[in-house]
Amino acid sequence: MNRLRILWLSHFVPYPPKGGCFQRSYNLIAQAGRRHDVHLIAMRPKAAATPDADAEARAALLRHCRSVTLLDISAATRPAPLARRALSSALTGRSLTVTLFESPEMRRLVRDAQASADVVHLDSISLAGYLPDVEGRPTLMTHHGAESFMIRRRIGNERSLVRKAFFAAEWLTLRRAERLACPRVGVNVVMSALDGEIMQAIAPASYRVVENGVDVDFFQPLPLVDGHSLVFAGRLDQYSNRDGILHFMDAAWPLLTARYPEARITIVGSNPPERLRELASVDPRIEVTGFVDDVRPYFARATAALCPIRDGGGTRIKVLDALAQGKPLIATSIGCEGLEVVPDRDVLIGDTPEAFAAQVGRVFDDAALRASLARQGRELVERVYAWEIPGGKLAALYEDLARPAASSPQPAEAAS
């Protein structure tokens, strides 16, 4: 097939590729750009970190895209405008996840660009408000997780009654948005068959799996490390990461250090909460780095990596990054949801503080186990999750959508 013109719409700027959704979108754009012509329109919902950030992002993305348009909507996400939009969404019964990203300027850009597109790629349910603007075009929508399901799961972990009430309302309105939007697109892309099953129950439609991936050239296997050192890496302004590591430090870390007083942990990620900084200030065994340009040196000195996530959804790129580096990984069941990992072969699973600490102890005490986990984890990501594999699946979906008479996408249960 000739190169297609793909209009990729994003509610965030997918550069730099730090953090799950950013890594996924950037790498899939790179893969798509090898086969087709990608025209990216991306919104920036938060102010740029540096004056040159947009220029750097545009230059990096233009290596893979034919055109890149970045739209700053950060004024709409400041506290006062955000509160007004949240109130308006509540009064009108619409999801803030969707209404937050509705912009007249974005609508104009989309309407102008869609006329020449072979396929329109909406990179999340947050862009559902633009479906009327691409009516009649072959469309694909990504679900980085089963969003309303993840919000419903979060309600149980919230302590604040106000936040519980907000998330309960957002769960219901977002579920309604999914039910309306998903059947309107040609195909919905999910991270795993599990996400497809969840979404099919919420919003019956066509779902296909395009897994998350990992750069197996950038993340090379590291030497195994004896000792009692741990690493956690993840954006700490993301709720599930912040909640997971705080819960680990409060509930499992004391159990672990009672048995291994010399144990150390390095927590890597942007915007760490004050609670973590306070812990590090009184305990020299705890290091909190904040944002780093390259996580690999921190993994290199660790005996094992952690993913103590107990909320959220989708599939965790941080798990794939750790496995690609040949680091023994201890995770929760939720942390490994949707991934083709086998407990005790590729990862160790602990779903209570006691079980999690015990699994860390197994890695500390057993060099043969460390070596086996490292080898099996690396083999798994090379076989299933190298970016070329999901990239090829996404390109095939574009091609199917561009010739709808020749293709009939199957439900997620039958897709792979």
Image (cartoon, helix red, strand yellow):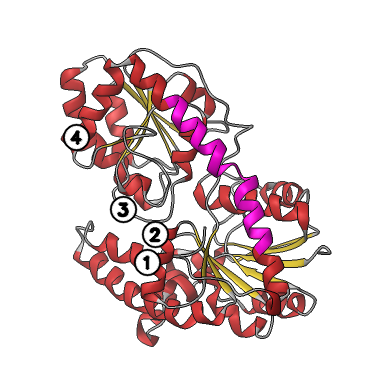
SS for callout 4: helix
Say if residue 284 shows up in the picture. no
Q: In this view, does 391 lie above or below 100?
A: above
Alpha-carbon neighbours of circle 2 within 10 Å: few (<14), some, or many (≥20)?
A: some
Image spot of residue 262 (x, y percent): 26, 14
Alpha-carbon neighbours of circle 4 within 10 Å: few (<14), some, or many (≥20)?
A: some
In primary-sequence order, the first of circles 2 and 3 is: 2
In primary-sequence order, the first of circles 1 and 4 is: 1
* Residue position marked by numbered label 3 in the rendering: 311
Q: Nearer the viewer, mark 1 or mark 3?
A: 1
Image disc number at residue 198: 1
Q: Distance between the residues labelled 4 and 3?
A: 18 Å
Q: Which of marks 2 and 3 is in front?
A: 2
Asked if marks 4 and 3 touch (Cβ < 8 Å), the reply is no
Q: In which quarter of the image is residue 302?
A: top left
Name the residue located 42 percent from the left edge and 55 percent from the top edge: 314
Image spot of residue 168 (x, y percent): 27, 72
* Residue position marked by numbered label 2 in the rendering: 194
Image disc number at residue 355: 4
Name the kind of residue labelled 2 in the image. Answer: Leu
User: Which residues are the magenta region?
Assistant: 374-396
